[in-house]
């Protein structure tokens, strides 16, 4: 039974990561939900972070060398460290959930989306690429990013519901009836 639950978790994380490769509006992906979900349902910190970052690395490699291909192999992209740090925080948020209740899932999704927004945009501002590195530049960066925040928040909440709901449904209704 335990192995079947782990396979279910791996499948849900894989589908969430794979959905990033499908056409989608900017910042409307299942990745934030995937990180929170993995943090919440996996018991091992090593596995929580390994699976989340593994899914990010694989999808980054595919996207950077197909859709965003610049003529030579690319692993790193500007702002990558800030994005990965954000996902580490999302896994941590998931790992701190006391239950998988709707209230906990929604709260974690909101907090995680805000953390992702603040950290990744702070990193972009720090790069000095588009905004001056003063308080006015930071404010301008956050204001310009607000439309993307809406997509991040809605997608994280939506896909959290799908991941946690699917996990609950399959693990309690299907796997509980399967003989080991």
Image: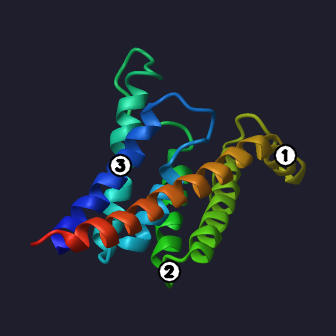
Name the quadrant containing residue 173.
Answer: bottom left
Q: Nearer the viewer, residue 104 or 17?
A: 104
In whole angstroms, how far apart are the C-alphas of marks 3 and 2?
21 Å
Residue annotated with mark 1:
143
Q: Which residue is mark 2?
A: 96
Where is residue 160? Give x, y as percent: 53, 59
Vertical position of residue 114 compared to residue 75: above or below: below
Q: Nearer the observer, disc 1 or disc 3?
A: 3
Q: In this figure, which residue is indicated by the disc labeled 3?
A: 55
Secondary structure category for the residue under label 1:
helix
Question: Crowdedness of circle 2 by 10 Å Cα count: few (<14), some, many (20+)?
Answer: some
Left/right placement of residue 2 relative to residue 180 reads: right
Quarter of the figure that contains the N terminus: bottom left
Residue appearing at x 35%, y 34% in the figure: 61
Query: Looking at the picture, does residue 73 appear above or below residue 164?
Result: above
Who's the residue at 45% across and 56% down the image?
34
Q: Relative to residue 164, is residue 53 drawn left or right?
A: left
Q: CA distance from mark 1 to mark 3?
A: 30 Å
Tell me if mark 3 has few (under 14), some (14-19) or many (20+) residues whose alpha carbon lies within 10 angstroms of its own.
Answer: many
Q: Residue at x 79, y 39 (%)?
A: 131
């Amino acid at each position: 039974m335990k192995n079947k639950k782990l396979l279910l978790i791996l499948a849900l994380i894989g589908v969430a990561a794979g959905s990033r490769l499908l056409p989608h509006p900017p910042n409307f992906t299942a990745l934030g939900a995937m990180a929170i979900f993995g943090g919440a349902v996996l018991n091992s910190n090593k596995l929580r972070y390994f699976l989340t970052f593994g899914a990010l690395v694989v999808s980054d490699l595919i996207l950077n060398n197909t859709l965003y291909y610049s003529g030579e192999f690319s692993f790193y992209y500007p702002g990558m460290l800030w994005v990965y740090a954000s996902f580490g925080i999302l896994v941590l948020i998931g790992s701190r959930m006391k239950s998988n209740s709707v209230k906990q899932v929604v709260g974690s999704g909101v907090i995680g989306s805000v953390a992702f927004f603040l950290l990744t945009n702070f990193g972009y501002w720090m790069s000095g690429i588009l905004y001056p590195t003063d308080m006015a530049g930071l404010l301008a960066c956050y204001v310009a990013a607000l439309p993307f925040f809406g997509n991040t928040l809605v997608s994280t909440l939506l896909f959290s519901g799908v991941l946690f709901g699917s996990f609950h449904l399959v693990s309690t209704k299907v796997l509980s009836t399967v003989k080991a």
